[in-house]
Amino acid sequence: MNEQPQRRHRDADATRTALLEAATELFAERGFGRTTVRDIAARAGVNQALLFRYFGTKDALFATILARQNRDRLVETPREQLFARTLRDVLATGGSGERDHSLAILLRAGDHAGAARVIQQDLGREYSDALAVATDAGDAALRGDLVLAWLIGIAVLRSIAGKEPLVNADVDQVVEHVLGAVRVLLERVEDVSPT
């Protein structure tokens, strides 16, 4: 009798994870507006009613994904390593061939009414503030915004536009070039080991 609730809990966790992963991939590929609940459920291999059960709405699922991917990085990463880690995540392809989708989701979210607010007021401000800590300059907030804009521009050219030679450039070479320039704006910026 005790085994049944535990089994349901594990299945619920697996279903929730499958929905999050499927939605993350689809939002990155298609954007919010062109991704349907049916598409997400089909990719996750579950009934679409389960999306509503675990997340309530597609909007709530979208917000969960944005918060999970970006805020986890902000909390877990030392400030002097934040830019390099985020840049490496944007550039790197993991062993499974999957890219970090967080910026792609944000960049393709223009068709979502709340996305601009989330980007500007929440994540954009949090990233800029975190990056600004890496300088003692009087215009630290502006410098944080400039560095964030550079990061977003790299993500657009590489992940969204597929611009050559950036799309196939060596990750370490890109990081070396970009960090050299970013250090002009932010004095305390460190590289991180490739993962």
Image (cartoon, rainbow, N blue to C red):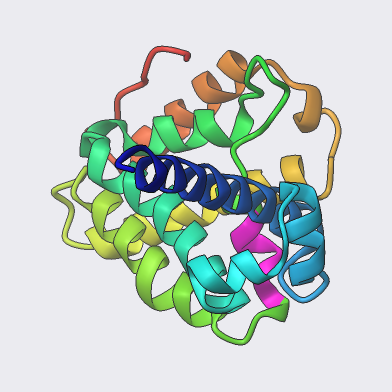
Could you tell whether 163 is left or right of 151 in the image? right
Residue at position x 54%, y 83% in the image: 114
Check if residue 39 falls in the magenta segment: no
Task: Tell me which segment is drawn in magenta.
Answer: 105-110
Question: Residue 61 in the image: x percent, y percent?
Answer: 54, 67
Identify whether 116 is placed above or below 187.
Answer: below
Question: Residue 20 in the image: x percent, y percent?
Answer: 57, 52
Dominant secondary structure, magenta:
helix
Identify whether 86 is placed above or below 123.
Answer: above
Residue at position x 25%, y 59% in the image: 129
Q: Is residue 157 visible?
A: yes
Residue at position x 62%, y 20% in the image: 94
Residue at position x 58%, y 74% in the image: 52
Could you tell whether 70 is left or right of 115 in the image? left
Check if residue 108 falls in the magenta segment: yes
Could you tell whether 8 is left or right of 26 in the image? left
